[in-house]
Structure formats: C-alpha cells, structure tokens
Image (tube, rainbow, N blue to C red):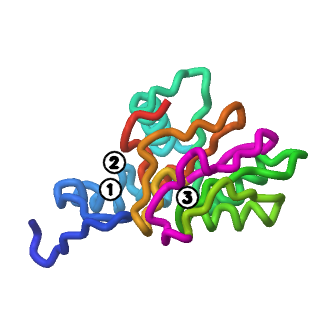
Amino acid sequence: MTEGRIYNFSAGPSMMPVEVLEPIQANMINFEKSGMSIMEMSHRGKEFTAVAKECDKNFRDIMGVPDDYKVIFSQGGATLQFASIPLNLLGTNGKADYIVTGQWSEKAIKECNKYGTGQEVCNSKPTKFTSIPKKEDWKLDPEAAYVHYCMNETVNGVEFNYTPEVGSVPLVADMSSNFMSRPID
C-alpha cells in the first residue's frame, strides 16, 4: 500500500486499490489519449459516447436488463429521487405508502408530503430504527399510488433481506447504498 494512505471502510465512499486509482488519475488529465479529461469533452463526442455505451452494456449484463427496457442514468442520488418519485408516480391519487425504518425513509416521506400525502405503513423510530416492524403490523393502503421503502438504512444498520410483499401496488425501493450487491428481480 502506498505510504500515507488510510484504510477507509465507510458505508459510503471507501478505500480503493492504488492499482485502480493510478489509471483513473492518468485519465483525469488525458482520457484514453484524447488530449482532454472526460470532464472536458462533449457528451456527444465519440469518446464519451463510447463510455456511455459500455456503461449501458455492462449495467444490462450485470442486472439482466432486457433490450426492450430503457436504462436511465441520472445524477442526484437518493435525495433527488425523494422528490422525483412522488412527482412522477403520485398521479391524481395524491397518496403513497412509506415503510419508515430509518433516517433515509424519514427524509423520503417528508419530501413526498410536499407534493401529496405520504402515509406511514409503519415506523420503527420507537426502537431507534434498529428493526423492521412485523408485516402483520403494517397498514398498507390498497389505493396508494406506490409503496416506498429503503432497502438498506445505513445510519442505524437496518437492511431488508427480502423484498416486501405489498400486493398489487407498485413497490419503489431506495437501493442507493446496496444497489448491485445482490440479484434483484
């Protein structure tokens, strides 16, 4: 290991091998010998287009996404999605169910309430967000536009090891901290 490097095993950004970082460092100045960094080139240029196509292909291969589906890459992470989800899915119904098991799902329902009504299916705050309430204690609304849950609440370490069964209501998962960590149907 290079001198002065710190072993960082955080839940978010964490340590990467120097063997991975060195080529990235070189490409930051001169991406694939194009004469510029990838951050300086046009998103329509051949170099960037090739990167985007490879990223799409790799994503489809890893996740098993069929060709008749579109893959959309967007910025903003989970916090941006807290607004994007109700803005796109609430429709005229105006209400959605939220399984509140930690700080991230708390933030998500708060954001939903700016655009409609976020209904708590359950809330594990009384246990300091250290557990997932039993399914029989949930109060699902069959008329909700969707049910939202955070698959992995990183702050207190609560993670669903299953996909919640919510009937015929669409299920929305915040998977920002464990995305691609296991197969998902």
Q: Which residues are magenta?
A: 126-149
Mark carried by residue 77? 3
Mark closest to the chain's N terminus, 3 or 2: 2
Label 3 CA crowd tier, 10 Å (few <14, some 14–19, many 20+): few
Q: Are marks 1 and 2 in contact (CB under 8 Å)?
A: yes
Point 80% across, 66% down: residue: 114
Which residue is tagged 2?
32
Which residue is tagged 1?
27
Where residue 171 sits: x, y (%)?
64, 40
Closest to the observer, 50 or 120: 120
Residue at the bottom extreme, as displayed: 4
Label 1 CA crowd tier, 10 Å (few <14, some 14–19, many 20+): some
Label 2 CA crowd tier, 10 Å (few <14, some 14–19, many 20+): some
Name which residue type carries label 1: Asn
Where residue 167 sits: x, y (%)?
67, 33
Q: Quadrant of the N terminus?
A: bottom left
Is there any visible trace of residue 113 in the rendered image?
A: yes
Secondary structure character of the magenta stretch overall: loop
Corner quadrant of residue 89: top right
Closest to the observer, 93 or 49: 93
Where residue 37 sits: x, y (%)?
41, 58
